[in-house]
Image: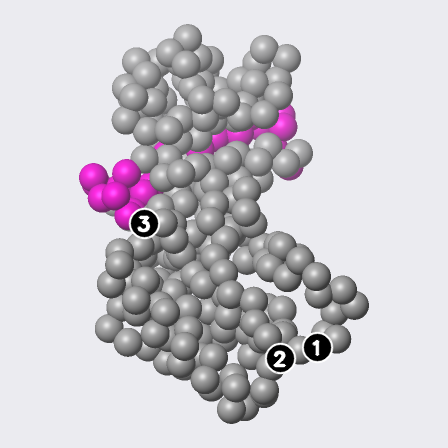
Amino acid sequence: MQFRRFEPADAPSVSALVAHTMMTTNIKDYSAKYLQADIDRMTPQWFIEKAAQTHFYVRVDNDVIKACGAIGSYWGKRDEVSLFAVFVAPEVQGQGFGRQLMGTLLNDPLAEYARRIEIPASITAVGFYQKFGFVGKNGLDSDEAQLVRLERWCPFCTLSTDRIIDQNELALAFFDRSPVAPGHLLVIPKRHCHDFFALTPEELTAIQDLLQRGKAWLEQTSHPDGYNVGFNVNAASGQSVWHAHCHLIPRWTGDVPYARGGIRQILGGD
């Protein structure tokens, strides 16, 4: 069975899973006294309340909850979120449950709209989260709560200035790092916005301005015979970077055996 949303009836099992995991996995990095204080705090009622404030997921195998995790707003901010209560039963660790759980959380709509995701990570789990691109918010030292604050930013919100080839007040352009063709450009709004359809008229105008300037540059430097231009919107379309971006892809006669269909073929993903 895949991950599903938490239900209040799951609370006792989730509480037991967390206690078992802490005393089996986290015990190598924390004292039993420290862990027991956390276990005493994370009662079934605590999980019911946490689930009401977040998108909380569980993985059930043979009627037993084997993993859980939640994602919710970071201090009420719409474009920043945090992960909570991420646990995988010791007996299934290393079997892909953690990777599937992170995939579920990072593909949740809250994550898709966020420019930054934070995790108050246990010392034990730092290496696991680093595999998903999380880095230390203030290095990898633990804080007064004996947790390591990790974060992951939207890659387009933290674009290095040396990659930007053109910009205006509301948008910027840069080369795609996995180009479909030489000169493949991306144009994005400077504001973090997941969805093309949520862009403002002013942002659309700014993007159009850079597309025209990008086309003029390509005409001068590489003389394409045509272009593919477009956005992917949401995972079903192939979007994988959750910051709206427009592809400007130069095309040449004969660059593929069958060009018919155009954007239907070339924009299969981000």
Answer with left or right where residue 146 lies relative to residue 26: left
Name the residue nearer the viewer: 87 or 1.
1
Query: Residue at the bottom extreme?
Result: 220
Residue at left 35%, top 46%?
A: 113
User: Which residues make up the magenta segment?
Assistant: 73-94
Residue at left 45%, top 63%?
A: 246
Name the residue nearer the viewer: 226 or 107.
226
Image coordinates of residue 11 in percent, x first then y, are 40, 13
Res 118 seen here: no
Q: Toward which corner of the image does residue 10 lie, by quadrant? A: top left
Name the residue nearer the viewer: 214 or 163.
214
Q: Estimate how packed mark 2 is, as few (under 14), some (14 to 19) or many (20 or more) residues with alpha carbons within 10 Å.
A: few
Secondary element under disc 1, as helix, strand or loop, is loop
* N-terminal-most mark, 2 or 3: 3
Secondary element under disc 3, as helix, strand or loop, is helix
Q: Nearer the viewer, mark 2 or mark 3?
A: 2
Residue at numbered disc 2: 225
The image's mark for residue 124 is none
Residue at numbered disc 3: 198
Amino acid type, label 2: Asp
**Quarter of the picture holding the C terminus:** bottom right
Answer above or below: position of 147 versus 87.
below
How many numbered circles does the render carry?
3
Answer above or below: position of 17 versus 178.
above
Circle 1/circle 2 CB separation < 8 Å: yes
Label 1 vs label 2: CA separation?
Answer: 6 Å
Residue at left 62%, top 25%?
A: 91
Residue at numbered disc 1: 253
Residue at left 32%, top 49%?
A: 198
